[in-house]
Image (tube, rainbow, N blue to C red):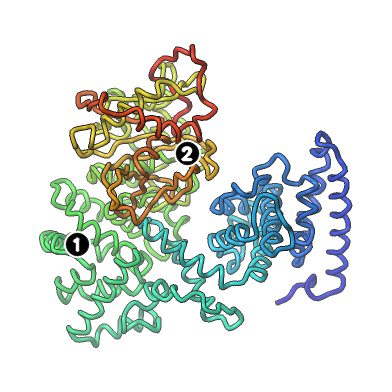
């Protein structure tokens, strides 16, 4: 259906009138001095917003991209340097309730489009770079092409929500869907290799690819060939459901199958699930059917090795109860979580099986049920949805993400417990979901999540996995309260908070290389030497890390500029396939594949990473580290670390976040102080 603006002369006249006003305001901005540009800019932005709200407004802006930038629209903002823009951040800008942010982001994309098409020769970015950047942006935000504004967008953005959609329709027409889909497929596989718990967004993107393939109006050319495996993994992984017949018809087909046919179905589903990390809605239908047929076929459908198969047979009744209670087409990912949980063998830990039986019968509070229904809808019951989350967290402890929330400490804690102490994680879930309260202790004093003041997050997080959705608000308040109890102490509060919050295995030894009062670097050599002695196998007697350790990093952008402090978990140090020493770590920041500048690019696959791990070369990782814990009773050989090795690390440090933190030579900083700490 077309709008009046698209079909009528009145619509064209309206756009032409607004564009004329825009040209006049841009001319005035260009003539203004640097001091007076700030006074002219709001009017330009407001008129540009009106232009972008017109169906053909993006084309008008693209034609004026050079004059807009030369007039100073981007001056003094993050968008002034397009070579440093990060594609993944565009989503937050385009969903912003602030009109200025939405408009300037749209202007920036249209500027790069003009560069990519060769209409604007830019000093900082080439046409090839601009084209590549835009294909990434389109791939990440492909949903804007196919979905109307959600209720949340309408509430927060109002009419602004139309601008990103007009923008992406224009970009798609100018760039071509074939470039977008290829890039999107690569992006999906890159993220799936990290095995995140939350895959709804990925499933939606695969659905959009399937729609593109079947839409006769969209010419994909030779692109999209790699999408077949992704689409089939969701909508037709086996012979009996390859045409996506619907779960009811598939269930009828299963009733007529013999044992050989069921075996083929089980093998096909298991292969697709373990290949992609995605579970088809048809898979739970098969699993539930097989419960009355054969445990061997259940094992085949879950793709279990001998370890997982033995665990299934040992805890047969529990596994059956988990499938009946939590594995439905609407909670299909529970099957993958169950399979990986069995493969971990954690049911053999004495408290885990009883704790999961408790979870199966857990009565949720009204608040917990309401939160789950609001976040995930009511297709599945809140109890089944939470059970899916529990299975996925126990099976994929490194797949926990913090969402778009400053709660990396809480996400890290849940991941660490699921990885290292699963029955404790299950206890946290029980307290939060059943009692609506968690009580932890700080140096012998009880802290109640309901009695504590607000946490780090200013709003209740909603974009989380089911377990995090229920537990994180409680953990966030407790973590903040522990920090408040350390306010009067000298030094960084994480020295005391981390062991109390995360568990006894967080070593009591603590080092930091930043002074809290000045923000300047301190004791850099000692900091580095002690880390090498504690974590590097060549200097600590080849002692592997026994328990995951909390640490804090200084996150930098692709230009190696400081962004903020962030909490991660050090998992292990080991040689990669090329024989280079790497640190493997968990990053709760949803997507661990990040460019931290100065050729420090975080790897998530291909360098010996296990599912969910990120990794960096040892010296690159240490250059971004600013807090770590160590066992003071297990010191390594400090003297054997060469000055050349330390200088290499310090080179990375001083070329990035430490470059403007060098203290005066006479500064005598006291050890143990730091800036605000990893609170993002």
Q: Which mark is residue 319?
A: 1
Task: Classify residue 23 as left or right of residue 487.
Answer: right
Graded by Cα atoms within 10 Å as few (under 14), some (14 to 19) or many (20 or more), the crowding at tag 2 reads many
Can you identify the residue that label 2 sits on? 555
**Along the line of sight, which residue is nearer the eye, 599 or 54?**
599
**Along the line of sight, which residue is nearer the eye, 573 or 145?**
573
Q: CA distance from mark 2 to mark 1?
A: 41 Å
| Occupied quadrant, residue 485 | top left
Q: Residue at x 32, y 58 (%)?
A: 388
Graded by Cα atoms within 10 Å as few (under 14), some (14 to 19) or many (20 or more), the crowding at tag 1 reads many
Task: Classify residue 619 as left or right of residue 293.
Answer: right
Q: In this rendering, is residue 503 above or below 365?
A: above
Task: Classify residue 456 as left or right of residue 133.
Answer: left
SS type, badge 2: strand
Q: Which mark is residue 201?
A: none
Residue 552, image x, y percentages: 40, 34
């Amino acid at each position: 259906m077309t709008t009046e603006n698209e079909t009528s002369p009145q619509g064209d006249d309206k756009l032409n009138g607004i564009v004329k006003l825009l040209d006049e305001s841009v001319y005035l901005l260009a003539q203004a001095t640097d001091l007076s540009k700030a006074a002219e800019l709001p009017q330009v932005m407001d008129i540009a917003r009106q232009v972008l709200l017109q169906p053909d407004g993006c084309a008008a802006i693209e034609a004026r991209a050079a004059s807009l930038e030369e007039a100073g629209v981007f001056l003094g903002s993050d968008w002034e340097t397009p070579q440093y823009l990060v594609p993944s951040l565009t989503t937050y800008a385009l969903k912003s309730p602030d009109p200025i942010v939405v408009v300037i982001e749209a202007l920036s994309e249209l500027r790069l489009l003009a560069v990519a098409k060769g209409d604007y020769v830019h000093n900082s970015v080439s046409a090839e770079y601009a084209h590549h950047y835009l294909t990434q942006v389109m791939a990440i935000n492909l949903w804007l092409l196919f979905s109307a504004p959600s209720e949340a967008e309408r509430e927060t953005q109002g009419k602004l929500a139309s601008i990103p959609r007009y923008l992406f329709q224009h970009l798609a027409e100018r760039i071509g869907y074939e470039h977008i889909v290829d890039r999107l497929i690569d992006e999906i596989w890159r993220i799936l290799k990290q095995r995140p718990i939350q895959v709804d967004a990925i499933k939606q993107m695969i659905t959009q690819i399937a729609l593109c393939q079947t839409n006769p109006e969209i010419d994909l050319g030779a692109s999209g060939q790699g999408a077949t495996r992704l689409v089939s993994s969701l909508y037709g992984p086996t012979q009996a459901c390859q045409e996506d017949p619907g779960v009811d018809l598939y269930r009828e087909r299963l009733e007529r199958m013999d044992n050989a046919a069921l075996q083929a179905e089980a093998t096909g589903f298991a292969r697709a699930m373990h290949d992609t990390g995605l579970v088809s809605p048809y898979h739970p239908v098969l699993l539930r059917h097989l419960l009355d047929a054969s445990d061997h076929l259940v094992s085949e459908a879950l793709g279990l090795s001998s370890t997982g198969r033995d665990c299934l047979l040992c805890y047969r009744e529990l596994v059956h109860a988990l499938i009946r209670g939590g594995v439905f087409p609407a909670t299909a990912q529970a099957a993958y979580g169950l399979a990986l949980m069995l493969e971990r063998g954690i049911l053999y830990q004495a408290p885990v099986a009883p704790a999961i039986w408790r979870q199966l019968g857990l009565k949720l509070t009204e608040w917990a049920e309401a939160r789950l229904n609001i976040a995930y809808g009511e297709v599945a019951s809140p109890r089944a949805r939470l059970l899916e989350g529990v299975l996925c967290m126990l099976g994929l402890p490194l797949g926990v993400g913090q969402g778009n929330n400053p709660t990396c400490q809480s996400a890290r804690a849940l991941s660490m417990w699921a990885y290292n102490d699963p029955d404790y994680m299950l206890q946290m879930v029980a307290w939060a979901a059943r009692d609506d309260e968690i009580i932890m202790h700080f140096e012998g004093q009880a802290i109640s999540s309901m009695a504590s003041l607000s946490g780090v997050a200013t709003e209740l997080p909603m974009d989380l996995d089911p377990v995090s959705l229920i537990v994180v608000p409680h953990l966030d308040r407790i973590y903040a309260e522990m920090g408040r109890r350390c306010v009067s102490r000298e030094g960084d509060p994480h020295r005391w908070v981390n062991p109390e919050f995360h568990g006894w295995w967080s070593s009591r030894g603590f080092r930091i290389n930043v002074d809290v009062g000045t923000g300047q670097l301190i004791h850099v050599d000692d900091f580095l030497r002690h880390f090498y002695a504690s974590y590097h196998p060549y200097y600590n007697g080849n002692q592997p890390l026994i328990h995951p350790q909390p640490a804090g990093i200084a996150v930098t952008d692709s230009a190696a500029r400081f962004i903020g402090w962030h909490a991660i978990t050090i998992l292990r140090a080991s040689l990669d396939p090329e024989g280079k020493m790497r640190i493997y770590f968990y990053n709760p920041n949803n997507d661990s594949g990040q460019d931290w500048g100065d050729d420090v690019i975080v790897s998530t696959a291909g360098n010996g990473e296990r599912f969910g791990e990120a990794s960096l070369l040892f010296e690159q990782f240490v250059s971004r580290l600013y807090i770590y814990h160590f066992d003071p009773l297990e010191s390594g050989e400090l003297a054997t670390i060469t000055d050349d090795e330390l200088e290499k690390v310090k080179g990375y440090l001083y070329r990035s976040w430490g470059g403007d933190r060098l203290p005066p030579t006479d500064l005598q900083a006291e050890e143990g102080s730091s800036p605000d700490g990893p609170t993002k």
